[in-house]
Amino acid sequence: MITPVFFLSLVFSKCCFCPLLCLNVDGMTSHANVMCCKSVGTDLSMLDIDNFITKINQLKKEVAVLEAKLRARGDELNSEKPRHTEDTEFSLTLLCYTDTNPTDAQNNVCDSNHSLNLDESTDQTSTESLDSVCYTGELMEIKTEPKVKEEQNDEYENLGDFVPAVKQMNGRNLGIKTEPTSDKEQIEENHNGGDDDIYLIPSASNNMDQGLILRVIINDGDIRKITLQERPASVEAFMSSLVEKLQLRYDFTLQFEDPDFNNALCNLTDMGDLPNKTTLKIIPRILLVGSNTSPCTTDIEMSSSGSFESSSKNQWPKFFEIPDFSFDVNHRLRQGDLLYTRNGTYHLTVSKDMKHEILHKLAECIYSFKAYPTDKDFAEVAKALINKHPCLREKGSCTGYYGWKNSLKFKMGNYRSKLRKAGCLDVMVNGGRKSKFAPEGQPSKLNIKKPRRDETNYLPNFPLGKDEISLERDRELISEEIRKRTPNTTIVSQKMDQTFPLRRKEIVEMELPVKTTLKRWPALFTEHEVFVEFTRITCKNLQTEFFGELDRHIPSLIKIFKSKNGTIGRTLSEILEQHEPSRNVNGTLCKESLVTLQRTAVLRCIPVLLGDNPSEFFKHFVASDDNSFLEHIPFGILTVISEESPHSSLLIHTDSVSTAIVIEGDIVMDQIKDMPLAVCLLFGLSYALNLDYPKGMKNTFYFIQQVLLDLGAKILKPKLQTLKNQLFS
């Protein structure tokens, strides 16, 4: 079709005897010259020539029809470039790319010449002309050069600016070179379109309105197909869609196969670069906040693929996905599900070997998340099983899966016994319990060492190729490096990552005192390593999530505090009165920022609201006093103030010298910037050192764990549930 934005579609066949078909159309309305090489003694197929000439004649007729329609509508024709259809000339050069040897092709020159003329009024050929010129290794291209005959005075539509579209032939692309139409002419021509014979060239931006079909590589063993009905407007929205569909619980970046670089992987920064059908790769990452900056400003990227990755576990999914079983079991389940769909009452009779395989596969899948799942976890897995395979639903059960849940519990116990014999540390730690074979052992249900606060990697196995001796050498190297005046932080981070299983074995299984751990692992008690260790254990970014959620709820919390009356209300009012920023004589704000003061006030008010006793947790210490009282502090935060401080009686000190963390009567970390950061670090140390929460602050620490960080059980204590309801109302 030829339209105001002329759309020329050429379909042709390549000569079967040579690698090149070179077509020159000179004077579209008058005649066409076709040149092609041929082998000695062989002529070009006349059928190919006839087809090409027919296409050209059809285009001539469409041009004439279009001109008539434009005149009938009274559209003003371009008078600056007068042309007549009869004088319109085009020069087209078609070069076919082939795999023929270039040297042989260039030497293959044909001697026969034939002349072919195209009569304007008919579709017949009068003369034939065949010239043989061979070129290879070239990309097939079309060049259009509109020519103007100045002697013509008739005013016609400018037919020189057109965009040809060339289809692929034999799997090879055709390059197109033409003079583009100006934007103004393009807009005018688009407004003139309205007939069925007019087709506009599709814009590249139309791809943005189409959906996406993606092959997503999460890891080498997890590759999924994702379909999105609508293309997201931004990369951030696209990543949010992937998080929802793939149930990803970690930060990541995206790479896609870029067709411009032979499908090499490139980072995705603009949705316009993403094809509608492509392969994506998920690159996990962990974002940690630098210690010398504000907690929510600067991010430091760290790879999440540590040396303990082979034994690490994943967080329990929001929706448990039932794995595939062996071929015969899957086949029987499909047949049973089909019969159940037909009548709604079919119940598959499960054989002993079939049930054994189903339970064993489910136990393996459960262990990849937890070694000791709860009753709620077993119920969730059993429910997911009958939802995916309704033919397994139990008729005599009120829930339809009660028997499967009990079977899973027993199977999981047997599976842990096998893993204990295989040497898995997270289940070996509870071995040797009292039984008929070991009557003097520890009671089976007493002091079970298992995750209780949603620790994903509670007690990981040693890395491949590593044992306790080699990891001990790495620990000694860390101790030597950390004692240097300027330690190499890269080496320390790498070795701390490698020795994570050994450190957890000592802390969880051997239950070393904090003082001993401080001597053996001094790097663990640095700000950076506390956050990294928490990430290794829970797969969460402590600093970012803690301060992010706290800042989000500060307005609601302050409103709740101000609404309280009685003794609690008076105490909360005293604390809130101090959170206003102090001003000096000139009326400028003090060094302590408003954000830090608000965080401090809220963290001091939460224990009061939840009924905790913060007096033994938050301690003030004058720099000149004796610090012997520290021996009686099992768990707390110490604020060091100067003698000249005029606000020594206040609960919130804006001019403190420093802040320290005290555990078991010893200062394990000092020179902390402010009190909110100290609370965050102390919470991280409770995970890193496997410590119980302080008795007088349990509700506050459970609030941080279950409400702010969304870790652990979803069933909250009444006070916590009430506060959470008020925050989210």
Image (cartoon, rainbow, N blue to C red):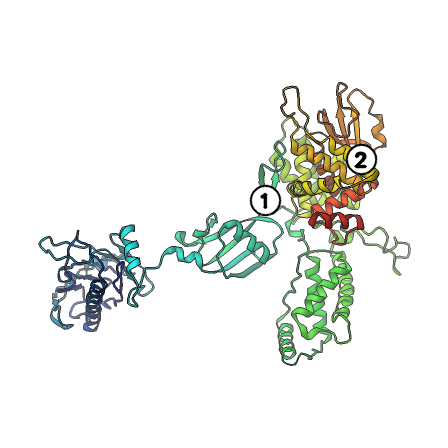
Report the side of 622 relative to 547 (left or right).
Answer: right
Q: Looking at this view, is 135 or 179 the one in front? A: 179
Which residue lies most toward the bottom here?
A: 343
Identified by mark 2, the residue type is Thr
> Measured along the vertical axis of the image, is residue 249 above or below residue 476?
below
Tell me residue 532's x, y (percent). 66, 41
> Measured along the vertical axis of the image, is residue 625 above or below residue 281?
above
Tell me residue 346's x, y (percent). 68, 80
Q: Looking at this view, is 716 or 371 the one in front? A: 716
Label 1 – label 2 distance at C-alpha:
45 Å
x 58%, y 39%: residue: 299
Which SS class for mark 2?
helix
x 29%, y 64%: residue: 198
Q: Which mark is residue 303?
A: 1
Identified by mark 1, the residue type is Ser
Q: Which residue is mark 2?
A: 571
x 48%, y 49%: residue: 268
Foreground tag (1 vs 2): 2
